[in-house]
Image (spheres, rainbow, N blue to C red):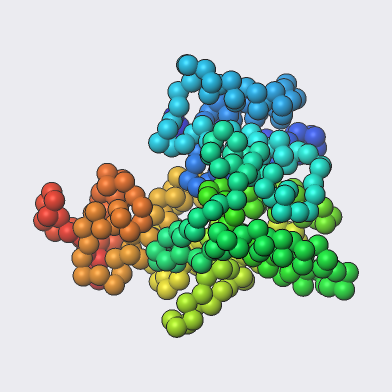
Amino acid sequence: MSDKIPFDFDEYIRQSEPSKQKKGYIWQTAIGLQDVDGLKPSEYLIETAKKNIDGDITLEEANDLIHSYYKSKTARLDVEGRTEEADKVSARIAQILSEDAFVFSPNQLIAIHRRLFDGIYPFAGVIRDYNISKREWVLQGKSVVYAGSDMIKDTLNYDFDLEKSFDYSALSIDDSIKHITGFIANMWQIHPFGEGNTRTTAVFAIKYLRSLGFNVTNTLFADNSWYFRNALVRANYADIQNGIYEDRSFLEKFFRNLILGENNELKNRYLIIGADVSTTEKIGDNAKIGDKKSAINARTKQAILDYMKDKDYVKARDVAEAIYLKPSRTRDYLGELVKEGWIIAEGSNRNRIYKLKK
């Protein structure tokens, strides 16, 4: 299966009539949001989306086609790449974003999660009853402190009640965006579900912003979904002993671009705590603009270099465990970094070690 999406949404949106443009934005957002979990849609999903945009089929029919495709014995499931999840969730996001119905409540958030992941996760629409932590590459392997399982419902209700009673009328647009940024960051930090929190948060945020009268029909979520997630991470992480504080400026830039159409620079490499910006600039420059595969490769290589920064040497298995890569893919990345001159390799086979080039 090709890594490159075989359909140019940007070009199609530019050349299409308004009704098709709206559908194009919706599908582009739905598909782009899968990138927060490194998921890629199939060519079949892209072709199905195109048929809907062209008016040949309805969104309901598009969802039915995707469901039938994976129910068929002839469907080629990419289990490792979770292509089935990417396709089904993309189609469901497109369906939800096409609907005007919206109620501002925790139950709406739960309902969105249920609709997105029904049949994919056994806990779709179910509040988690266990505590979680997630090692983040922008935090050098550390985790955000998420809400404890015993406090999720109370915390959700509290945050939603505060937001529902909040009066925006006295705020400037700048202060309104700051407030919205804080609410979305707090909601995400609760992390009420076992998986799928960021995609659920993004869909809810889009629906909520529309209910407030903001026009957020553009490609920002599609083009910067990975940045959106990492900005949420930085907005909710603090290590005061080491001089690191919750920083919502990154997320605020995202929402200013989304709501005001500003052109603030949204670069993932700036979100890494303690990152050497000069190095991340060079690594990032190796990725072709708009090439998601290159972007993923670039940020993975950067995570490897950051992991090696304070170590005399590493082995492939150390890197694999640190940033959650398969051993075979880890060796590939290390080999590429050797060829590019960032690191050096010594020894052979199981005794091979890698050192950061000074």
Q: Is residue 52 visible?
A: yes
State the quadrant of the C terminus. Answer: bottom left
- Where is residue 323 shown, x and y percent of the image? 36, 56
Q: Residue at x 58, y 20 (%)?
A: 68
Report which quarter residue 49 is drawn in: top right
Q: Residue at x 57, y 61 (%)?
A: 150
Q: Residue at x 49, y 59 (%)?
A: 131
- Where is residue 44 shown, x and y percent of the image? 55, 25
Whether 326 is drawn above or below 63: the answer is: below
293 or 172: nearer the viewer: 172
Q: Residue at x 80, y 49 (%)?
A: 103
Whether 75 is drawn above or below 163: the answer is: above
Q: How many labels were placed on the picture?
A: 0
Q: Is residue 190 visible?
A: no
Report which quarter residue 261 is drawn in: bottom right
Q: Is residue 78 left or right of residue 56?
A: left
144 or 15: nearer the viewer: 144
Whether 82 is drawn above or below 164: the answer is: above
